[in-house]
Amino acid sequence: MATFFFSSFLLLFLSCATNSIPVAFSEQNNDYLVSSQLVSHAAVEKQSHFRLYCHAIYSDPNPTTVRVAAASGTNKSSTYFGLVVLMDDPLTIGPDANSKLVGRAQGTSAAAGLYKMEFVMATNFIFTDGKYNGSTIAIFGHDEVLAPVREMPIIGGSGLFRFARGYVQARTYSRDLETGDTVMQFDVFVNHY
């Protein structure tokens, strides 16, 4: 009887132990695979909420947002269809341009709507301050410019935001109709480890 229990325990122990050992693969079948192992679910995922203000400056002698391309009909379009801009905009903790700088919003935005002012936005929020210095959050999505609140997905990140997911809510805080200079408020809801 004792032998039966010992054999059962040994079999159970060995089956559990083999499930936690990284699996080795034949080099000839997967020569591009560096390693493969179980992912621990012990790490705790958390959600952080940041409120940032992005300053798109067109009017300065050194603008932070510039037009880089346009279709032949862009200037005749009420929606700027075909316009492409690049940005390297300051991210601050307040709407005032002189508030604390915590990062940059670098990316591109393209007018993709024929009938409404709708842009495709691909932007990285690059943090340059404090604990998050050097970390990034990648945003890619639909930006209906005239809507009061626009929601876009977070598709990844780096540094402390590696494996990030979540969403941002964008609001136009202010816009100068003469210069085009715009301050955007971004509420960032990011899940990360």
Image (cartoon, rainbow, N blue to C red):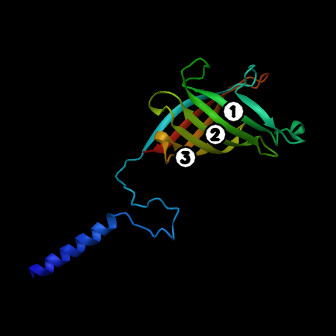
In the rendered image, which residue does mark 3 sit on?
Answer: 156
Q: Residues within 10 Å of mark 2 (few under 14, many from 20)?
A: many
In the rendered image, which residue does mark 2 sit on?
Answer: 123
The tag earlier along the polypeptide, 2 or 1, is: 1
Mark drawn on residue 185: none
Give, as a three-letter code, the residue at label 3.
Answer: Gly
> Residue 173: x percent and y percent?
64, 27
Give, as a three-letter code, the residue at label 1.
Answer: Met
Towards the viewer: 87 or 189: 87
Residue at 28% in and 72% down: 15
Could you tell me if the residues under marks 3 and 1 are in contact, i.e. CB atoms within 8 Å? no
**Looking at the image, how many numbered discs can be counted on the residues?**
3
* Quadrant where the image shows the N terminus: bottom left
The tag earlier along the polypeptide, 3 or 1, is: 1
In the rendered image, which residue does mark 1 sit on?
Answer: 87
Helix, strand or loop under label 2: strand
Residue that protrudes farthest toward the top in the picture:
98
Could you tell me if the residues under marks 2 and 1 are in contact, i.e. CB atoms within 8 Å? yes
Distance, label 3 to label 1, CA atoms, is 19 Å
Distance, label 2 to label 3, CA atoms, is 11 Å
Residue at 49% in and 36% down: 49
Left or right: 163 in relation to 72: left
Left or right: 162 in relation to 145: left
